[in-house]
Amino acid sequence: MGIAVYLALVVTVVALTIVAVALAPGFARRPVRSLPLAVTPFLLVGVLSLLTLNAGGQPTLEWKLPLTGVVVIWLFCRSDPIFRRAGAAMLVLSVVLVGTFLSLVGSGHYTAAPERTAGMLRHRRPAVAIQPLWHSPLTHLHRVGVEGTHGGG
């Protein structure tokens, strides 16, 4: 269930970007000095997420995707109120995505560092299997399981 929530949040970030730009399309005439103000909270989330030093991997997509969305909205949405609301929503989504990612990799069922996780787990459980998922190229999340077991108990 956690992975479904995570993927839904990723899709929400992309959808919010598209909707915000579609509501007021056109090049925005904002001063360039407002861009650092808009992206700084996301960079802080990124720095704080890297400081977690999680062996299962650090969240990167989780703050970079909303950051990219805010930059796209900053460029292509002419409405300042829509930009501010979308930016605030993206910041909340970024924090929730980072938390969801850390929850997933902290559970031991997923990893974003498959080689490191496999090496660490082989000492405790020799028959560990790290399996890529359909979204692994985007999210970097891989399923951690035990070789030779099948679902269902």
Image (cartoon, rainbow, N blue to C red):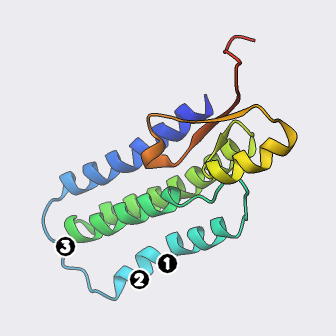
Q: Is residue 78 visible?
A: no
Residue 36 got which mark?
2
| Residue type (three-letter) at the residue carrying disc 3 | Ala
User: What's the CA distance linking mark 2 and mark 3?
Assistant: 15 Å
Residue on which the image places disc 1: 40
Compare residues 47 and 130 and report the one nearer the observer: 130
Compare residues 16 and 99 and report the one nearer the observer: 99
Q: Residue at x 43, y 59 (%)?
A: 66
Residue on which the image places disc 3: 28
Q: Are marks 1 and 2 in contact (CB under 8 Å)?
A: yes
- If the image is split into quadrants, where does the C terminus sit? top right
Side (left or right) of 49 relative to 66: right
Compare residues 44 and 101 and report the one nearer the observer: 101
User: What's the CA distance linking mark 1 and mark 2?
Assistant: 6 Å
The x and y percentages for residue 70 are 36, 65
- If the image is split into quadrants, where does the N terminus sit? top right
Indicate the secondary structure of the residue bearing disc 3: loop
Is tag 1's residue or tag 3's residue first in the polypeptide sequence? 3
